[in-house]
Image (cartoon, rainbow, N blue to C red):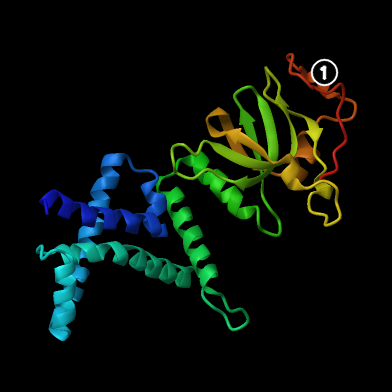
Amino acid sequence: MPSNLLLFLPLLGGYLFIHFCHRFYFRAQALDGYRLIFEATIAGFTLFLPCRVVVYLLGQGWPELRALWYGAGGHVPLLSSLALTLPAAPLAAYIWNLCEGLRALPTSRDEENDEWAFLEASREKALSWAVKRWGNTLQNLLHEAAKRANDKDPALVCLTMKDRKAFVGWIAKSPNLRANDAYVSVIPVMSGYRHKDTLDLNFSVFYPVESYFEEDGRLSADEFLTALPVAEITSARFFDLDLYFEKFAPGEDEPVSNQGTNGLAGAPAGRVAASPS
């Protein structure tokens, strides 16, 4: 067998390990092709060492089984050890994920976590670590907002686009580190625009937030789910709804239309009363 094909086996094994192991999977999204190949090679040959030990011990304990395994590989030196890296890679990644999940989500006496809970905890921990380590400021903010969207008091975020449109809502899904993941999913609470000169926020649309999570409600949050291109976002920040309406919202005697619509479609003739929940 050509030597380059022998080298391909640990490379493939390393790639499988990186793909299935949460800790390295999300980090790999930020790597270019050559760096990914390099790290897959390192992972593959790291897996090769214990596989070689296993094959050696197998030969010491069960010589006939080792002869059978060696014969299945066409009696090519090291092929049996290199081929063993392929099934060993996902198994090693699975064990790594479980260990990470056990550390991230310890089992308490009151609540027993199953296998899937540990794997999900491992995934969330690895994603947070990768975004914090290799993500930019916007990715970090969107990811943190997405995590806090499941809290009892979910965090609102205000996103301003290049065309001065503004959206306030909860982040349903933040983009990861993959280059082609170019959108962020938002459950809007209100939307509007920024004044062309002062850049003050003016909101013209208020969504039926109170009916989003009602079991018998006719409208659900998914019906208003909005995907926004990350490349079009010019600013993002956490948004305090109470503080805005207390300190910054236009008064009843100061209609939004007097603050300059600059031709934006759907700009209101006056301020619409909001009912944030």
Task: Tell me: 172 left or right of 192.
Answer: left
Expressed as whole percent of the image width and height from the top left, the position of residue 211 reads 83, 49
Label tally: 1
Which of 42/158 is in front?
Answer: 42
The kind of secondary structure element at disc 1 is helix
Task: Tell me: 37 left or right of 156.
Answer: left
At a point 86% along the width and 21% down the height, the residue shown is 269
Q: Does any portion of residue 57 appear in the rendered image?
A: no
Relative height, residue 23 to residue 168 (above, below)? below
Disc 1 marks which residue?
Answer: 258
Which of 276/50 is in front?
Answer: 50
At a point 85% along the width and 38% down the height, the residue shown is 274
Expressed as whole percent of the image width and height from the top left, the position of residue 63 reads 13, 82
The residue most toward the right is 253
Which amino acid type is marked by label 1?
Asn
The residue most toward the top is 263
Q: Residues within 10 Å of mark 1 (few under 14, many from 20)?
A: few
Relative height, residue 22 to residue 49 (above, below)? above
Relative height, residue 203 to residue 38 (above, below)? above
Expressed as whole percent of the image width and height from the top left, the position of residue 35 reads 27, 44
Considering the image in quadrants, where does the N terminus appear? bottom left
